[in-house]
Image: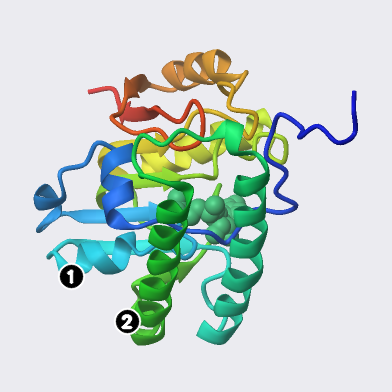
Amino acid sequence: MNALLPTPELEIPSIAFFGRTLAEYCQFFSLDPAALKGRSVLDVAAGPSSFTAEACKRGADAVAVDPLYGCSADTLSQHVTIDYRNVTEQILAKQHLFRLKSFGSLEEAELSRRSASERFLADYAAHFVHGRYIGASLPQLPFFDGAFDVVLCAHLLFVYAKRFDFDFHLAACRELVRVSRDDVRIHPIVGTNGRKYPELGRLRIALAEEGIDSQIVEVDYEFFAGSDSMLVLKRKQ
Ligand SMILES: C[S@@+](CC[C@H](N)C(=O)[O-])C[C@H]1O[C@@H](n2cnc3c(N)ncnc32)[C@H](O)[C@@H]1O
């Protein structure tokens, strides 16, 4: 292949500390922002997303988890600087992998994500000590069974499928369901090549054998090609 042609998938050297706003979460998770009020919500692999800060402002009892929480706000700000540069370069170099359904332009998307990180960093500095941001990693979460009404996990599982094997995905899904009272929503279900996670069928069968129902639900959103659905998990009644 011609070395100058762009490769057909995103090349992110490590799991990016990159985040989105509540408005973008509501689109790719089909959430009604008004319905968050009074509910307990856990955002796993939250990175510098402003979802938790914004949800708390709207009266939700929201908590975010990420392995990097516990670092100082200055250190997280440095991660943001480096990872936003890498991701933005990739987006501009691989524009054929993006769809302008939810943003008018790539620049608008970048501004939205940058605003998310700024809001996150300010909220993290103010609320880390209050337990709003918890340092932890899948596949183990430091919460009681059924601790949260809704559990969300965006842009970790399936996206980085080359770094995490099947057993990790199964254990992570099991753990997300363990800490949820209602449902778990995972987005997207495609990898960095825009193709559906190849082990999704096998994963859903393994989850069903453990008493967990799964559904692929279309969402009114697409930015990265193929990111127009989510996986919803629920313990069978
Ligand atoms: C691309 S960001 C996604 C941020 C946010 N969920 C969003 O969609 O805007 C992925 C995050 O996963 C975190 N992460 C990496 N390994 C993890 C693990 N084993 N468990 C939970 N989070 C992890 C990274 O630190 C990073 O902040």
Q: Is the residue under label 1 in contact with that under label 2 (CB below 8 Å)?
A: no
- Name the spot of residue 177 as percent of width and height, x first: 38, 38
* Residue 85 found in image quarter: bottom right
Query: In which quadrant will I find the N terminus?
Result: top right
Amino acid type, callout 1? Lys
Amino acid type, callout 2? His
State whether residue 217 is above or below residue 174: above
State whether residue 123 is above or below residue 96: below
Q: How many marks?
A: 2
10 Å crowding of disc 1: few (<14), some (14-19), many (20+): few
- Of the pair 118 and 74, the residue shown nearer to us: 118
- Of the pair 232 and 20, the residue shown nearer to us: 20
Tag 1 residue: 57
SS class, disc 2: helix
- Name the spot of residue 52 as percent of width and height, x first: 31, 63
Residue depicted at 70% across the width and 49% down the height: 12
SS class, disc 1: helix
Residue depicted at 90% across the width and 34% down the height: 3
Tag 2 residue: 130
Q: Quadrant of ligand 1?
A: bottom right
Q: Is residue 49 visible?
A: yes
* Residue 156 found in image quarter: top right
- Of the pair 107 and 182, the residue shown nearer to us: 107
Q: Nearer the viewer, mark 2 or mark 1?
A: 1
Lower position in the chain sequence, tag 2 or tag 1: 1
Q: Is residue 229 left or right of residue 5?
A: left
- Of the pair 139 and 20, the residue shown nearer to us: 20
Residue depicted at 67% across the width and 40% down the height: 10
Residue depicted at 60% across the width and 72% down the height: 81
